[in-house]
Image (cartoon, rainbow, N blue to C red):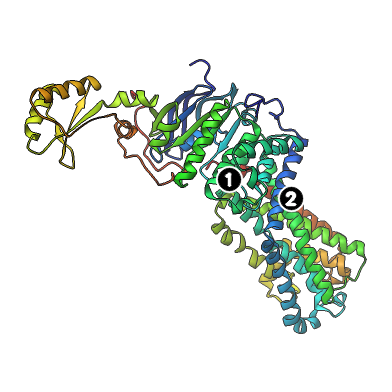
């Protein structure tokens, strides 16, 4: 090191939108490498939804098939796979909170905050990497579902639109979990704080079963919560408008779910960024 | 000190009702190791966090390398490096990938980050292990890597928060060598420690912090001279001890005490070696032949005890935040 310490000319002393994107990519790559280098993470993340797929399809399939709308073409798998895409998104979102709390505990976030990088990059890099991870895990689940007999009943374009909707929703949940993780601060606490509310949201919804047979007090919640709205819209896209509850139109339901995605992302991202700025320990 | 590279003025910060920093002012001259010594919860880590832009103090001003840290934190970040109490490196990345990533986040283009990462790894003796995953590194290697990761940005000032807490003695020596090398290359180092030996060995100047204030400051020798004089220790045979005690009392002007082991007489040597010579002459005149005579300089332990009233910690790492401590009454106190 001949020319040492006192040259700072190469370093930036201001952040710009372009440098913010670059920083987010550097952080995102780091987070993704963790999944690649520690393959057990991705294996467990993939095995769990496949297990759900097989269990639900064969345990419940026989009992449920008769109650499904005709759009499911008599196959519970056709009904289940779009719902499981949302279930995977919901269960996987806790990883965002876990990753952030681990970085907080290990002093990695302190290191990042002491560098002349964009403040937004830590959160954008985290949620961005989790979006890629979700795409891989959900994609693998769909592949296994297809091998077992899942078939979309509309067009490839509509199927892909439904897939994209699932990813957008997964991304919005990542922001929710980023906000949770930055407030809870320890991986141990995240386990309960993040996963506890996920269970009632996933089961009291149309993810596994139509809500028609639920008691009316539960239906009020189940029919209107975002997981049901998004799952219904995805089924409408993948299986046809006949998969929607009576009286609902596909266009309206897709717009409603996009509305949820935008609102959740905006509120949660604001909360997460505020929590990040306020980190003091 | 008008050319200070770190200038802290009247910094106050509270965590809830706990006053962590209570009017800290500190100047660090460029090119030195400045030690920040203090017991747990004294405010060391809080001060480092303020300097490293991680914490905005309630009041006061902070300047690093000519940049106002509170007005232009990004500008300050381009000129500093931080290594905290944990090795904040990613175990699943290689050493090289870790350093390169930090380089990219300093804003270096990819090729430059790669080139500098190679230089840094060479310099800290990890060149041969650079392409192994950090999960295979020893604790000392991780610490060195953590410390060195910031060097890729060639910071003018490095803040090291307890850089050797919780590592084995050999790794500690390696980290010390790295710090000495850093300063030789022109970097200024401000390090916190609760190890007196570390401060004594590394720091050109030492500030002792307690209850959120700098209570005393100076070189290690100045601090020692300020709080305690040297101690003269004389060992005699048990038969001679009583007579020797009387002779020595006449020389130093106070009754010597028996040391805890009961075999040596201890007394203050206010004139240092002059007292030693006078004592030996007096003993010789009285016909007493001592078994051993030693002049003991005060240690930083004595300084620590004298200024903080707390026993220094030797092994336990400091907690993240400040220990709960009631806010002190008056703002002014003579140091």
Could you say where residue B194 lies in the image, as x and y percent from the top left?
41, 38
Asked if residue A185 is positioned above or below residue B1 in the image, the reply reads below
Could you say where residue A193 lies in the image, as x and y percent from the top left?
58, 59
Q: Chain of mark 2?
A: A
- The residue singled out by tag 1 in the image is B88
Mark 2, Cα crowd under 10 Å, few <14 / some 14-19 / many 20+, is: many
Q: Which mark is residue B68?
A: none
Q: Quadrant of residue B111?
A: top right
Can residue A221 be seen at all in this image of the molecule? no
Q: Is residue B133 left or right of residue A253?
A: left
Q: Is residue B90 left or right of residue B167?
A: right
The quadrant of the rendering that contains the N terminus of chain A is top right
Asked if residue A192 is positioned above or below residue B98 in the image, the reply reads below
Which of the pair B52/A172 is nearer the observer? B52
- The residue singled out by tag 2 in the image is A128
Q: Quadrant of residue B210?
A: top left
Q: Quadrant of residue B75?
A: top right
Q: Secondary structure at mark 2?
A: helix
Asked if residue A150 is positioned above or below residue B269 in the image, the reply reads below
Q: Residue at x 72, y 28 (%)?
A: A10
- Distance of mark 1 from mark 2, alpha carbons? 22 Å
Which of the pair B275/A199 is nearer the observer? B275
Q: Residue at x 49, y 44 (%)?
A: B171
Mark 1, Cα crowd under 10 Å, few <14 / some 14-19 / many 20+, is: many
Q: Secondary structure at mark 1?
A: loop
Could you say where residue A253 lies in the image, as x and y percent from the top left?
82, 61
């Amino acid at each position: 090191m001949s020319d040492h310490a006192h040259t700072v000319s190469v370093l930036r002393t201001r952040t710009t939108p372009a440098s913010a994107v670059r920083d987010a990519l550097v952080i995102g790559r780091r987070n993704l490498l963790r999944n690649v280098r520690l393959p057990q993470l991705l294996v467990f993340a993939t095995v769990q939804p496949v297990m759900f797929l097989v269990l639900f399809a064969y345990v419940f399939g026989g009992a449920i098939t008769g109650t499904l709308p005709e759009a499911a073409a008599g196959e519970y798998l056709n009904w289940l796979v779009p719902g499981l895409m949302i279930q995977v998104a919901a269960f996987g979102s806790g990883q965002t909170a876990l990753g952030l709390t681990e970085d907080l505990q290990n002093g990695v976030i302190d290191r990042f905050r002491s560098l002349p990088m964009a403040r937004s990059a830590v959160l954008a890099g985290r949620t961005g990497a989790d979006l890629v991870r979700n795409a891989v895990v959900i994609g693998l689940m769909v592949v296994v579902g297809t091998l077992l007999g899942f078939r979309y009943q509309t067009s490839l374009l509509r199927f892909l639109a439904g897939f994209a909707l699932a990813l957008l929703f997964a991304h919005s949940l990542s922001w929710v979990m980023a906000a949770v993780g930055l407030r809870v601060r320890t991986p141990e606490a995240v386990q309960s704080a993040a996963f506890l509310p996920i269970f009632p949201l996933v089961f009291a919804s149309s993810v596994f079963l139509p809500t028609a047979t639920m008691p009316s007090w539960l239906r009020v919640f189940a029919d209107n919560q975002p997981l049901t709205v998004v799952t219904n819209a995805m089924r409408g896209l993948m299986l046809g408008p006949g998969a929607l509850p009576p009286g609902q139109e596909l266009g309206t339901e897709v717009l409603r779910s996009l509305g949820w995605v935008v609102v959740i992302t905006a509120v949660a991202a604001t909360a997460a960024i505020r929590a990040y700025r306020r980190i003091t320990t | 000190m008008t050319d200070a590279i770190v200038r802290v003025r009247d910094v106050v910060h509270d965590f809830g009702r706990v006053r962590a920093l209570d009017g800290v002012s500190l100047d660090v001259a460029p090119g030195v190791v400045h030690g920040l010594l203090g017991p747990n919860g004294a405010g060391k880590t809080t001060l480092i966090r303020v300097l490293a832009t991680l914490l905005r103090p309630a009041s006061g001003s902070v300047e690093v390398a000519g940049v106002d840290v509170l007005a232009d934190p990004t500008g300050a970040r381009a000129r500093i490096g931080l290594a905290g109490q944990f090795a904040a490196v990613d175990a699943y990345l290689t050493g090289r990938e870790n350093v390169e990533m930090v380089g990219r986040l300093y804003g270096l283009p990819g090729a430059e980050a790669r080139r500098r990462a190679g230089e840094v790894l060479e310099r800290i003796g990890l060149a041969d292990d650079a392409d192994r995953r950090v999960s295979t590194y020893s604790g000392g290697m991780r610490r060195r890597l953590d410390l060195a990761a910031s060097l890729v940005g060639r910071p003018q000032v490095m803040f090291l928060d307890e850089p050797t807490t919780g590592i084995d003695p050999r790794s500690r020596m390696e980290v010390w060598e790295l710090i000495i090398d850093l300063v030789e290359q022109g970097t200024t180092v401000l390090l916190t420690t609760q190890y007196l030996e570390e401060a004594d060995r590394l720091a050109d100047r030492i500030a002792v912090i307690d209850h959120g204030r700098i209570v005393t400051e100076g070189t290690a020798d100045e601090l020692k001279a300020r709080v305690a004089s040297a101690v003269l220790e004389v060992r005699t045979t048990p038969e001679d001890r009583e007579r020797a005690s009387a002779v020595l009392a006449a020389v130093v002007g106070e009754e010597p005490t028996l040391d805890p082991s009961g075999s040596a007489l201890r007394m203050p040597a206010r004139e240092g070696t002059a007292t030693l010579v006078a004592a030996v002459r007096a003993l010789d005149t009285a016909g007493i032949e001592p078994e051993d005579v030693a002049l003991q300089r005060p240690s930083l332990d004595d300084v620590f005890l004298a200024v903080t009233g707390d026993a220094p910690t030797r092994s336990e790492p400091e907690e993240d935040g400040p220990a709960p401590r009631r806010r002190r009454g008056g703002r002014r106190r003579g140091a």
